[in-house]
Structures are given as structure tokens and as C-alpha cells.
Amino acid sequence: MKASCPREALLSACQLVSAAIPTREVRPILKNIKAVATNDRFTLMATDLEIGICLDVRGLQVTDPGEAILPASKMISILRENRDDELLITCDASSCTVQGAASNFDLPTEDPSQFPDWPTFTEEKYHEMTAGVLREMIRRVIFAAADDAARYSLTGVLWELEGEKLNLVATDGRRLAVTTGMATPQGGHATTGQTPVVPTKAMSLLERNLVDDPDALVKISIRHNDVLFRTERATIYSRLVEGRFPSYRDYLPKKFTGKATVQASAFMAAVRQAAIMADDETKRVAFRFDKGTLTLEAQGPTSGRSKVVMEIVFEGKPVSVNFNPAFVVEVLRVLPTDAEPVIELGGPGDPALFKCGPDYQYLVMPLT
């Protein structure tokens, strides 16, 4: 294999696919990236056997088609530290050379045939939607997924596809994020009767592949045990999380006694200020909603005390409730700065439901 490569483009591609390389020892060859060069295409592959990506790299000139195994960490270091605009990569069965204007690197390699086979997107049943919409939906839920292995069935995002409607849902048991968007079905694709949960790692990898063209179409095919995504440049594969996702609709409150409308950026600034004095152990800020004002207070045994007051629009009975400020800040970060979310409230021990438009809900549990 021999190809002339734009260094920056290849570095970006290697960094992107390296997200699929296993962090623990699985098989030694999986610590590498597989490169496949044809006359008109240069593709990089990486997998940890649970998720994987096949990414087309643009701008390369292939003079000798072939396949090669590239040591991922060394290759990324070379591309990052080198300053040449173009690099020449030459590989055979026993060696791989990366050559610049005044540099030469000889890398060890392995037999490309030992790299796992890669699934291709040949599905006739799938949903299709624009990259920009899907990326925004992922951003609005992924932060709420569990990162605790003990909550395995929650360590991902639930996909509900029915007709032209897509729901993405994530929860860690302390907060719950739900977002809705439009997707076009092909071939009768649907998840009726299933609760497919895509791992957080795969969701992050997908989101990073949706930045180039917001109008590009993405194909989504959820099968019995796995899922395939096809973007403009990449095919991403992932096994689904085992276990049953909770019936999340049962946790969304149907009644509330107070409703506040806040300005997102001002609200986030106030919460962050109040949180400065929150106790490290309890991580508690008291939110008191009253007519026209929201008062936020925090106090630790040694840290001191904070009190922040901001103007809001509030309807209903005054209520004071304690929240982990990080859970509030995280949802505000994924909203437009000029958004005006509505917060529906019950009593002091009830969860609060944040709503931003008709397509986004975020439930956060109170601290006792």
C-alpha cells in the first residue's frame, strides 16, 4: 500500500476512529487501526468488538492499493508532532513507513487479515434523518446516561422509532432526559416491542461524526442485538446494551403546583454562583421559587454561605426544593443561551420537570 496523505486530515481521522479502540486488553491487534486503500478510496477502521467505526478519509492520493495495520498511538503521535503538509505512507506485509520532507518513521505492523471483519450497511429497513437534528438530539440526552457499571441497562441511550417519530431517552436514576425529533422510515423499520439501548460510547462516536454537514442524511438500522449507523463518511456499528430500560413515562409527573419561566444563561450563571458554597458531600443548593423571584442558597459546614436572587416569571404556590446544582447546570449547557425553559414544580420532595419547547423534557430528582 502506498498513499500520499494530507497530514491534518489524516490526523483528524485517526483521532476520530481511535475512540473505538479498546481501553482494556481484548486482542493485541485491536490496539491498531486498519487502513484499506483502493484506487479511489482510503478507509480507516477501529473496533473493540463492542463498537466500531469505518471512516473514509478525503484528499488522499493512492498510488498502490492495499491494506495495512497502523499502530494507533504511534501513528497519532507522528501526525501530531510532524509539521509537513503532506506525508507519504508506504506499507507491505512486514513494515510501514511514514515519510516527510525531513523525517522518516518505520513502524511495526501485523497481518491485516487478522483484523476482525467489518459489517457493511446493506439494510433495507432503516430510518433516515439529517445529521444536524440528530446531533442536537444526542447532545440533549447523553449527559443524563448512567456511568456506573452497576446500572448497566442505563449506560446508554434508548431509541424509540415509530413511524416518523424518534424519541431518545437517557437516565441514571437521578435525572431523566427525553427528546423527540422527526425521522423518515424506509422499508417499515421500527422498534415496536423493543427497548434498544445504544451504549454511551457509541453515541459519543456517532455525535462526533455529525459535525461536517448538518443537512447530510444519516441512516439508522436497529436490529435485534446491534445497530448500524451510516453517515456521509462513516459506518458505525454497536452492540446494544443488555437488560431492560425502565418504563420512563411512568416517572414523568402529570400534575404540578407551580410553574417558573427562566432565561437559560442568567439562570445558569445564578446556579453556578450559588453552587460555589455548596457542601462537597451533600452537593445541595436550595431553590426557592416565589412570585417574581428565585432565591438560591447554599451552605457548607466550613465553606461558608451563598445567596443569589434572580427575577423569574412564576405561577402557583411558592415552593422550596433542594437540587444538585450540577444536574441543573448540565441541562442548561445544552440549551441555546437565549432559551426560556419552563420548570414545572410540585412539593419540596417532588421532582422538577424542565421543558424547552414541545420536544425536550428533563426531569431532575430533589435532594432530601
Image (spheres, helix red, strand yellow):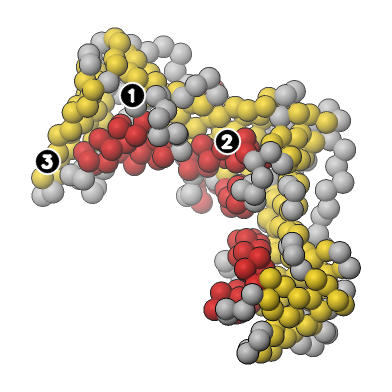
C-alpha distance separating marks 2 and 1? 22 Å
Q: Tell me where residue 345 appears, x and y as whole percent.
A: 34, 18
Q: Answer above or below: position of 240 versus 104.
A: above
Give the amino acid type for the residue marked by disc 2 in the picture: Met
Q: Which residue is mark 3?
A: 305
* Residue at 28 percent of width and 38 percent of height: 269
Q: Which residue is mark 2?
A: 137
- Residue 262's tag is 1
Figure quadrant of the C terminus: top left
Asked whether residue 26 is in view, the answer is no
Quadrant assignment, res 220 = top right
Q: Tell me where residue 206 appears, x and y as whole percent.
A: 64, 49
* Residue at 83 percent of width and 31 percent of height: 186
Near mark 2 (Cα within 10 A), the count class, few <14, some 14-19 or many ≥20, is many
Near mark 1 (Cα within 10 A), the count class, few <14, some 14-19 or many ≥20, is some
C-alpha distance separating marks 1 and 3? 24 Å
* Residue at 29 percent of width and 15 percent of height: 314
Give the amino acid type for the residue marked by disc 3 in the picture: Arg
Closest to the camera, between mark 1 and mark 3, is: 1
